[in-house]
Image (cartoon, rainbow, N blue to C red):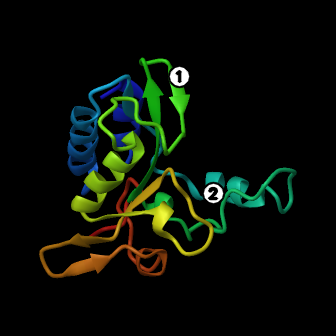
Amino acid sequence: MDKISLQRIEKLHPLVREEVKNIIKECDEALTGRAKVRITQGLRSFEEQEKLYAIGRITTGKKVTNAKAGQSIHNYGFAVDICMIIDGKVANWDTAKDWDNDQVADWYECVKIFAKHGWDWGGNWKTFKDLPHFERKSIPTKKKTIKTSWRNLSKIARDKDGYVIL
């Protein structure tokens, strides 16, 4: 796993950090060619979310999100966006490329691995598909399993570091 991905993982909610490290390790082991996974986005502040929401609405550009601040799972540290890093240098978002020539697109090898661990893929969404995006569907706690919808998470108290207390 590359240093940039590791730094981004360390900012995710503490309950998913080790799991995401394991998922990325599993993806990288499955990808036997020139491509490896890089996390391009993890935890996102409310301010960063508002700036993204403004694109295509207030500022110029194509809309990149329908989520306002507080409405993205990134805002709670339970989502990541990825790309492929080719030869350790070049970022690539081609979801059809099979860099290891095993007859399965590298991106979809990762989609299957994330799904196996209970993560939802933005490419499965009915509207506004978000191919680089993965988010944890739910988090098991000692008392119950919490569905990680922004509506649920926005109502939960936060600790001194700003993470929801589960």
Q: Quadrant location of residue 37? A: top left
As drawn, the label of residue 81 is: none
From where the camera sits, is residue 117 visible? Answer: no
From this view, report whether residue 145 is shown above or below residue 28: below
Which mark is in front, 1 or 2?
Answer: 1
What residue would you read off at disc 1?
A: 90
Q: Which numbered dot is residue 49? A: 2
Tell me the quarter of the image containing the C terminus: bottom left
x then y, percent, for residue 120 = 38, 65
> In the rendered view, does 13 fall on the left or right side of 62?
left
Above or below for 77 versus 82: below
Position of residue 68 measured from the top left corner of the image (x, y, whole percent): 65, 68
Question: At numbered mark 1, what does the secondary structure look like: helix, strand or loop?
Answer: strand
Q: Say what amino acid the circle numbered 1 marks.
A: Val
Residue 66 appears in the picture as rendered: yes
Q: Tell me the amino acid under the disc marked 2.
A: Gln
Please name whichever residue, 83 or 15, is drawn nearer the observer in this view of the structure: 83
Residue at image location 54% in from the left, 40% down from the top: 94
Q: Quadrant of the N terminus?
A: top left
Q: Is residue 156 depicted above or below 98 in this figure?
A: below
The kind of secondary structure element at disc 2 is helix
